[in-house]
């Protein structure tokens, strides 16, 4: 039974690692396309502080669980404790891989006409409303398309739109 658990856990870790690496490649292609469409006039607004804090929190939790099980193996049996620590080590590697490869794609990329999120380019003039919630923001366009973005990106977008509106009002 333990061997099946180790094989399953290893397969899951390999799958998650593969997904992160291929996701990075897809995100990079989308970002390169946005840069090309914008003629390399793209501004990057940092939004990844909350995302990175959450990732570090999960990383610390997994480290704590690993240390706890290593200090108290009698609670789960020595063989189970070793397997758990191996799985936790794999999770630590996956979390570090995710933090190092995907941080860049948590930022808000804007040009003079709009912004890009996950390969979707939205023009500022097509934004009907931005509805913030606790974990994400819903951007609704005049064509009733809805795009969910992270709350940090939503706040940065609302601030940017306010600045653009103020600049437009001062020109008049």
Image: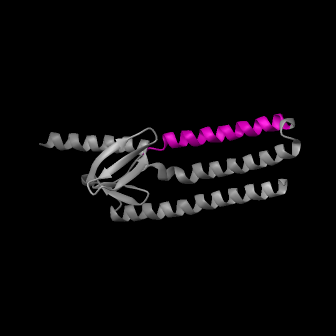
User: Does the segment drawn in magenta span residue 89?
Assistant: no
Residue at image x 81%, y 48%?
83
Residue 28: percent from left, percent from top: 48, 61
Figure check: 172 above or below 111: above
Residue at image x 36%, y 60%?
40
Residue 168, quarter of the rendered image: top left
Residue 20, quarter of the rendered image: bottom right
Residue placed most toward the observer, 165 or 129:
129
* Horizontal relation, residue 95 to residue 25: left or right: right
Residue at image x 22%, y 42%?
165
Residue 138: percent from left, percent from top: 37, 47
Residue at image x 87%, y 46%?
79
Residue 23, quarter of the rendered image: bottom right
Residue 1: percent from left, percent from top: 84, 55
Residue placed most toward the observer, 154 or 144:
144
What secondary structure is the magenta-colored segment mainly?
helix
* Horizontal relation, residue 126 to residue 102: left or right: left
* Horizontal relation, residue 140 to residue 10: left or right: left
Residue occupying the far left of the picture: 172
Figure check: 34 above or below 160: below
- Which quarter of the figure is the C terminus placed in? top left
Residue 32: percent from left, percent from top: 43, 63
Q: Which residues are magenta?
A: 46-73
Give the colour scheme of this rendering.
Answer: one colour
Marks counted in the figure total 0
């Amino acid at each position: 039974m333990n061997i099946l658990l180790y094989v399953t856990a290893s397969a899951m870790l390999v799958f998650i690692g593969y997904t992160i690496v291929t996701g990075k490649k897809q995100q990079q292609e989308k970002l390169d396309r946005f840069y090309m469409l914008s003629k390399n006039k793209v501004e990057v607004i940092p939004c990844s502080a909350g995302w990175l804090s959450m990732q570090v929190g999960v990383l610390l939790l997994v480290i704590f669980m690993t240390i706890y099980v290593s200090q108290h193996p009698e609670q789960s049996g020595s063989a189970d404790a070793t397997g758990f620590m191996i799985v936790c080590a794999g999770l630590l590697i996956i979390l570090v891989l995710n933090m190092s490869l995907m941080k860049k794609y948590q930022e808000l990329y804007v040009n003079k006409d709009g912004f890009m999120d996950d390969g979707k380019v939205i023009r500022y003039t097509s934004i009907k409303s931005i509805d913030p919630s606790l974990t994400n923001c819903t951007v609704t366009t005049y064509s009733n398309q809805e795009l969910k973005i992270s709350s940090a990106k939503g706040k940065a977008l609302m601030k940017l739109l306010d600045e653009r509106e103020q600049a437009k009002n001062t020109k008049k």
